[in-house]
Amino acid sequence: MRTVAALALAGILAGCATPPESGSVYNSYQTMNEQVVRMGTVESVRNVTIASPESGVGTMSGAALGGLAGSEAGGGKGAIATGLIGAVAGGLIGQRVERNASNRAGFEITVKLDSGELRAVTQPADEMFRPGERVRLLSNGYNTRVTH
């Protein structure tokens, strides 16, 4: 029974894997689309945290594991009570783990365009930018990224 539960949990977690977000990574639907390119100079860079919405996988996984562990700890009718307590505690712990794991480092990059306009773009902190650097802003009308 434990093996089946562990395999089911592994399958759920694997199905929730997402591709990395980055200023340098394009999803397949973003290819072969024209983008507007604007040139500018970095005015400032500020460290930010990018929080992804919680999927509920951490809560469900924690509850399943906590309930399984709790039911193994109790005996007889106590197994039900300890299973429920384990499920609640595991769900809360799983939710906190997912929340912390989904937060990523990011930059808020303020760019002064050659036209004189200021633009701020927030993106993952996978490429370093410094004030005074020349950069490109690539925009498809929905998303904008800053690149060198």
Image: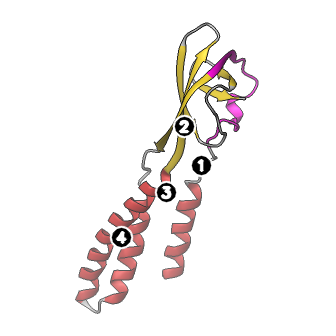
Residue 92 image point, x, y percent = 33, 64
- The type of residue carrying mark 2 is Phe
Alpha carbon separation for disc pair 3 and 1: 13 Å
The residue positioned 39% from the left and 81% from the top of the image is 69
Residue 29 sits in quarter: top right
Checking the image for residue 86, the label placed there is: none
Q: What's under tag 1, amino acid-wise?
A: Thr
Label 3: state its secondary structure: helix
- The disc labelled 4 sits on which kind of residue? Gly
Measure the alpha-carbon separation of dots 2 and 4: 33 Å
**136 vs 60: above or below:** above
Q: Name the residue beneath numbered marker 2.
A: 107
Q: Nearer the viewer, mark 2 or mark 3?
A: 2
Question: On the image, numbered disc 3 is attached to which residue?
Answer: 101
Q: What stretch of residues is rendered in magenta? A: 21-41
- Circle 4 sits in a helix, a strand or a loop, which is it? helix
- Mark 1: few/some/many CA within 10 Å (<14, 14-19, 20+): few
In magenta segment, residue 38? yes
Mark 3 residue type: Ala
Q: Determine the secondary structure under disc 2.
A: strand
User: Which quadrant holds residue 65?
Assistant: bottom left
Circle nearer the N terminus (3, 4): 4
Q: Can residue 139 be seen from the camera position used here?
A: no
**Which of pointers 1 and 2 indicates the residue nearer the eye?**
2
